[in-house]
Amino acid sequence: MTTQSALITVMTRAARRAARGLLRDFGEVEQLQVSRKGPADFVSQADLKAERTLREELERARPEFGFLMEESGAAKAGDGRHRWIVDPLDGTTNFLHGVPHFAISIAAERDGELIAGVVYEPLRDETFWAEKGQGAYLNQRRLRVSARQQLRDALIGTGIPFMGRGNSAESRRYLAELGAVMGAVAGIRRWGTASLDLAFVAAGRFDGFWEHGLGPWDVAAGIVLVREAGGFVSEVEGGSSMLASGSILAANDHLHGILGDVLRKAGKA
Ligand code: IPD
């Protein structure tokens, strides 16, 4: 039996509590699909409610931590050393459309370094968690990134630019990247929840993942998961400012290099 630290216990408890409300609301969303107004307002309320629950729980347990949250931004400074980075509902578009693939993502940062991450997928009751130096786990099972060495065997997750990024240089670069990767791999998936994409890399379900334009709350917890599962994470361009740039490439050691080369070559062409 794996013992969780007090920090991970705080994070998983908060995620599970917020998830109870999200699960109830997800049930409602299916009913709202057919109404003329649609579920958009309802879903943004569900998102805000989850964020409030997470904030209350995390603040009570660790009053010294500041917050960076998707809905309320840099909500509280804290002691200036510790910070939660939280996405109360990652996969909002899936949730809004009744697609059963979304998660709560919580990361803990100390002195600018990510030290713990929890990604909770309430529908399958899967808790992906990791703490710096302690490994990555799915519920009680230790996680390792996949051992695949060849792109032709690899299943790769990605995120496709959407509304507002239609005909930009960014989307043209993305199409070039997609074109280069899709012919070289066993399959590509766009599942719409970046925190889970990274958790799936940590679990060896995906062999790699790349996306641009993400928020820090989408990736912070997943970065800890992939690293602690023995994988590599960088910006697609190779740098290490993923939280600031929103560009991310994650994979096992070997495929990280190969996939990165393919993406950078395509992006420059
Ligand atoms: C989104 C998801 C999605 C990614 C988007 C994100 P949200 O987060 O992670 O997979 O492609 O760029 O914005 O808005 O559902 O928290």
Image (cartoon, rainbow, N blue to C red):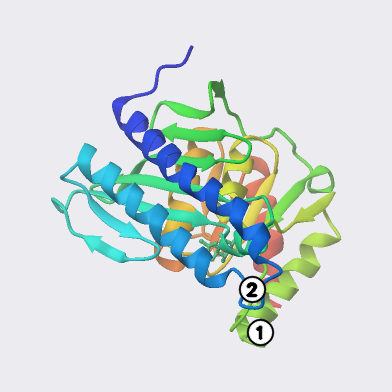
* Residue bearing mark 2: 161
Residue furthest out toward the bottom: 167
Expressed as whole percent of the image width and height from the top left, the position of residue 175 reads: 73, 74
Establish if 160 lies above or below 67.
below
* Ligand 1 quadrant in view: bottom right
Give x and y (percent) for residue 189.
75, 55
Q: Which residue carries the number 1 mark?
A: 166
Residue visible at 67% across and 68% down? Answer: 160
Residue 187, above or below 62 = below
Q: Is residue 91 above or below residue 122?
A: below
Say what amino acid the circle numbered 2 marks: Pro
Is residue 135 visible in the rendered structure shown here?
Answer: yes
Instruction: Name the residue at the top extreme.
Output: 1
> Nearest the camera: 112 or 21?
21
Circle 2: is it few (<14), some (14-19), or many (20+) Cα within 10 Å? some
Mark 2 and 1 residues: CB-CB less than 8 Å, in contact? yes
Let me know if residue 240 appears in the view.
no
Q: Kindly identify the residue that appears in the image at 68 percent across and 34 percent down.
A: 146
**Mark 1 Cα within 10 Å, few/some/many (few <14, many 20+)?**
few
Q: CA distance from mark 2 to mark 1?
A: 7 Å
Amino acid type assigned to the residue bearing label 1 in the image: Gly
